[in-house]
Image (tube, grey):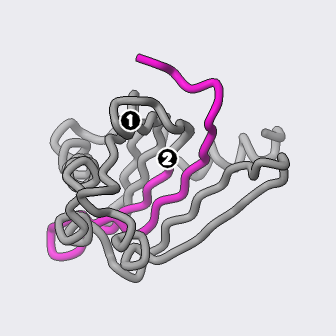
Amino acid sequence: MTIFSALLLASAVPAAEPAPADRAAVMAPLNALFAAFEAGDSAAMLAQVYPDGRVTASGLRGDGASNVRQMSWTQFAGRVTPQGAFQERISGPRVAVDGDIAMVWAPFVVRAGGRVVNCGYDHFDLVRENGNWKVMNLTFSSHTSGCPTQ
């Protein structure tokens, strides 16, 4: 990260954590989203998101080249099935709220069949509409090595 991008990020992200009730409200749809992934329940997943929002993954191909993939939540829902269920856990999420927008940044680990399959960082942006938070977009990095095993 360059000094410029660090300063930009520091000025763009509220320094203080939101109040515990606000933090819990922002985290609620994410917790429901993770439960839907684990259950392989695409309908439950879509209830937590704006279906036309985006899921963007950044990782490396087998040859080491960068690989950025994008899809809508609706397209991603097609991959969330009981046969394709997976467990995603985040830790130490940083939450920022400004009015009716929020973001969550956290490291994650994904397990399938009880085994770690990838890890990285999640960045969720959320919008509150009519008092309810929904996930607009998810952007994440994806690594298959160097992941925590616990």
Q: Position of residue 1 (x, y in %)?
A: 78, 39
Q: Position of residue 31 (x, y in %)?
A: 23, 46
Q: Amino acid at mark 1?
A: Ile
Magenta-span inclusion, residue 129:
yes
Q: Which residues are magenta?
A: 123-150
Q: Position of residue 4 (x, y in %)?
A: 81, 46
Magenta-span inclusion, residue 146:
yes
| Residue sitting nearer the eye, 1 or 31 | 31
Q: Give the Cα separation between the discs numbered 1 and 2.
A: 8 Å
Q: Is residue 134 left or right of residue 147?
A: left
Above or below, comparing residue 87 to residue 133 in the picture:
above
Q: Earlier in the sequence, mark 1 or mark 2?
A: 1
Q: Amino acid at mark 2?
A: Asp
Q: Secondary structure at mark 1?
A: strand
Badge number at residue 117: none
**Residue in view at x 43 percent, y 60 percent:** 125
Whether residues under marks 1 and 2 lie with C-beta atoms below 8 angstroms apart, the answer is yes
Q: Secondary structure at mark 2?
A: strand
Residue under pointer 2? 122
Q: Position of residue 149 (x, y in %)?
A: 47, 19
**Residue in view at x 36 percent, y 63 percent:** 126
Above or below, comparing residue 134 to residue 113 in the picture:
below
The C terminus lies in which quarter of the figure? Answer: top left
- Magenta region, main secondary structure: strand
Q: Residue furthest top?
A: 150
Badge number at residue 90: 1
Tally of marks:
2
